[in-house]
Image (cartoon, grey):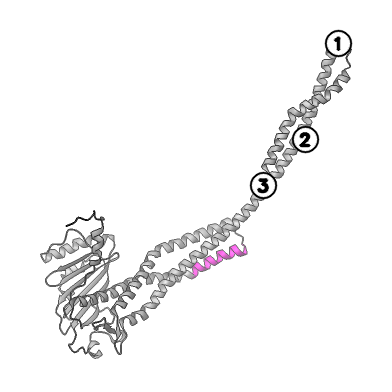
Amino acid sequence: MKQTPQDYFLRRELNDEVHTHQYEKLSPPERASCIALLVNEAERAKEWEHLAELCEIYGLTLPEKESKNLHMDMGEFRLKVERHQEFTRYTFVRQGGGEAPFSDPAANHVPEQWLSTIPGKTLVAAHVGIMQGEPDGIPPTLAEITGYFETETLSGSRAGSSSSLVFTDFRIREDGFSRFLVIANSRLPTQNGRLLLRILDVETYRMLALIALPEARSLIAKIPALDAQLTTITDAISQGSEMNDEALLEDISKFAAQLESLISSTYYRFAATRAYFGVVANRLAELRETPLEGIPTLGGFLNRRMEPARNTCESAGKSLDQLSNRINHASQLLRTRMDVRREAQNQDLLAALNRRFHLQLGLQQTVGRLTIAVFTYYSVNLIGYVSDALAVHFHWALNTVEIEAASIPFVALIAYFLVGRKVRNALVNSESLK
């Protein structure tokens, strides 16, 4: 045997994923009881230990490694456990039933103390009676079926290529369980198992899809107030108000934070609801229902009854998204206006600074010219004093006035180069700033 390269560390787990949802093999007559429970993290941690208690009662050993799915034969009944992200579903199946499919359900044979203490909160509980169809394929009359259900909400259809019959009224009875009746016309146990799984999926996921409905209704009741609050803010931006832009921006920030909190608290639930509605639609399509005269199909009944709930959930989510987009637009408009106003203020400030600079430069030039004049005046006087002193000391015949007059251009030129250089440098710097 040739050795393959080293396996990817999740290869086995990924490959076995297609085998996790195995069908229960059903040979009518059979009775099934299904309980789906919502579980949190703490309750999830207790599930395996709770299953171990059931195995101990029947002298069985539970695998040490926890798994998403489990199939076990307890003797009195068969147990299938499916552990999903939000919920865990327990399906108990027992052979037998005959002409009275709901008289002795499979759940009655599960230890009562163990059953009542399963971790989680019950979302779905259903009894399913699976009866063998007549050899001639003639379906039972509605009069025979209505004895098990309420006629006002009774729905049913032929399902799949085997044309098995499925009936339910989606009512929860006094024992806390709803009822499904399956009249199987297939001789293949796996085909009957597929039908049971699809029915249970429809019932479980429709309930999961509706968890968001109360929250959606509560949210829709808040939308008008939120919309009015946002309209007040946008009117203040567009029409002007006594509030300055900074105060408006603070109000927008508070509103956006409030809205983001609502979106964050509902995002997961609404996203899960959309996914669950999709699963329900998929499972109903897989049933491939054919109508029976006088009653609606399961898909027809659920689509009519669940469409308003679905629209409510979608409307709540879309309303939040629209409010979020509107507050973002309002915030951008206000920030743009503030940026334009700030830019105009900056331009005015720069213009004022430029004028001030030119005034300072003019003053500096004037001071520079005065400095040249003063320097020239005192320097020329100093030259005159020196000339007088030299004339007296050496008895020279010097004309002090002529000497002073002749020195004026030279002294002024020296002063210009010494003092004027600073003025010229200031002029050059001013031009570069422009």
Q: Quadrant of residue 281?
A: bottom left
Residue at 55% x, 57% y is: 249
- Is residue 418 in the magenta section? no
The label on residue 69 is: none
Q: Which amino acid does the dot numbered 3 rest on?
A: Leu
The label on residue 392 is: 1
The residue identified by callout 3 is 350
> In the rendering, at what x and y percent does residue 411 appear?
80, 24
> In the rendering, at what x and y percent does residue 214 appear?
38, 71
The disc, 2 or 1, on the residue closer to the chain's N-terminal end is 2
Q: Outermost residue toward the left?
A: 59
Q: Which amino acid does the dot numbered 1 rest on?
A: Val
> In the rendering, at what x and y percent does residue 274 appear?
37, 70
Q: CA distance from mark 1 to mark 3?
A: 62 Å
Q: Is residue 116 above or below residue 342?
A: below
The disc, 1 or 3, on the residue closer to the chain's N-terminal end is 3
The label on residue 366 is: 2
Indicate the quadrant containing the C terminus: top left, top right, bottom left or bottom right. Answer: top right
How crowded pointer 2 is (Cα within 10 Å; few <14, some 14-19, many 20+) is rated as few
